[in-house]
Image (cartoon, rainbow, N blue to C red):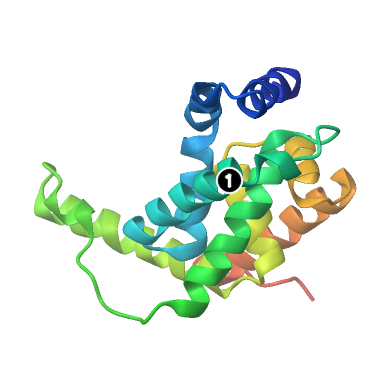
């Protein structure tokens, strides 16, 4: 994620009319943004749509990007807002998990699906602030510094939230309790 000068140059090229300069930005950030959206929304199709919409909105509003900040931080905020919009507007429905069609044995597939669903349910029970830092750290593979910049928090606050989020996940998933 330490490619801000390159990102800024690509944005400048886009604003100068070279729209193809946006493609490297998409290629660089599509995986991490999709993973964040998937963990926030819990649904593959919704996550794909939210990430794609975030890129479209970013492209349309490129002139509002403040070059003193990292491009990732800016598009990340757009994605989070899009995910919140999707969550507000969606209707709950059951859906078959694509992992059930894996070539592994049916037992392993079922265990993997159940484990993923359990983790997703535990993530959903965290506060938005705790879920956000967990998703960025473990599913987005961001450093503490990158998380701090993306969320506008101090690095110390990111570490503190991660510590508390891991503790809460431990309680939810493993039944951990605080020693008294």
Q: Is residue 17 left or right of residue 27?
A: right
Residue located 71% across and 44% down the image: 74
Q: Does 121 appear above or below 156?
A: below
Q: For the point 49% across and 54% down, which residue is it? A: 37
Give the percent coordinates (x, y) of residue 19.
52, 26
In the foreground, 159 or 32: 32
How many numbered badges does the structure rendering display?
Answer: 1
The percent coordinates of residue 115 (x first, y second) are 35, 59
Q: What is the x, y in percent for residue 25?
A: 56, 28
Q: Is residue 17 above or below residue 91?
A: above
The quarter in which the N terminus is drawn is: top right
User: Is 6 displayed left or right of 90 in the figure?
Assistant: right
Q: Which residue is mark 1?
A: 60
Local packing at callout 1 (Cα closer than 10 Å; few below 14, some 14-19, many 20+) is few
* Residue closer to the observer: 56 or 71: 56
Q: Nearer the viewer, residue 40 or 84?
A: 84
Quadrant location, the C terminus: bottom right
């Amino acid at each position: 994620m330490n490619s801000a000068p390159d990102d800024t140059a690509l944005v400048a090229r886009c604003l100068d009319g070279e729209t193809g300069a946006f493609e490297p930005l998409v290629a660089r950030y599509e995986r991490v943004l999709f993973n964040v959206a998937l963990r926030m929304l819990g649904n593959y199709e919704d996550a794909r749509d939210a990430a794609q919409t975030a890129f479209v909105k970013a492209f349309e509003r490129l002139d509002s990007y403040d070059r003193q900040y990292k491009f990732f931080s800016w598009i990340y905020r757009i994605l989070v807002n899009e995910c919140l919009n999707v969550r507000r507007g969606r209707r709950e429905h059951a859906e078959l998990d694509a992992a059930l069609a894996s070539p592994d044995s049916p037992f392993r597939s079922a265990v993997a699906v159940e484990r993923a669903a359990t983790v997703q349910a535990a993530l959903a029970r965290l506060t938005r602030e705790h879920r956000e830092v967990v998703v960025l750290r473990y599913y987005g593979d961001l450093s503490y510094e990158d998380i701090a910049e993306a969320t506008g928090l101090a690095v110390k606050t990111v570490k503190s939230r991660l510590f508390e989020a891991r503790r809460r996940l431990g309680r939810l998933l493993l039944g951990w309790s605080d020693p008294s």
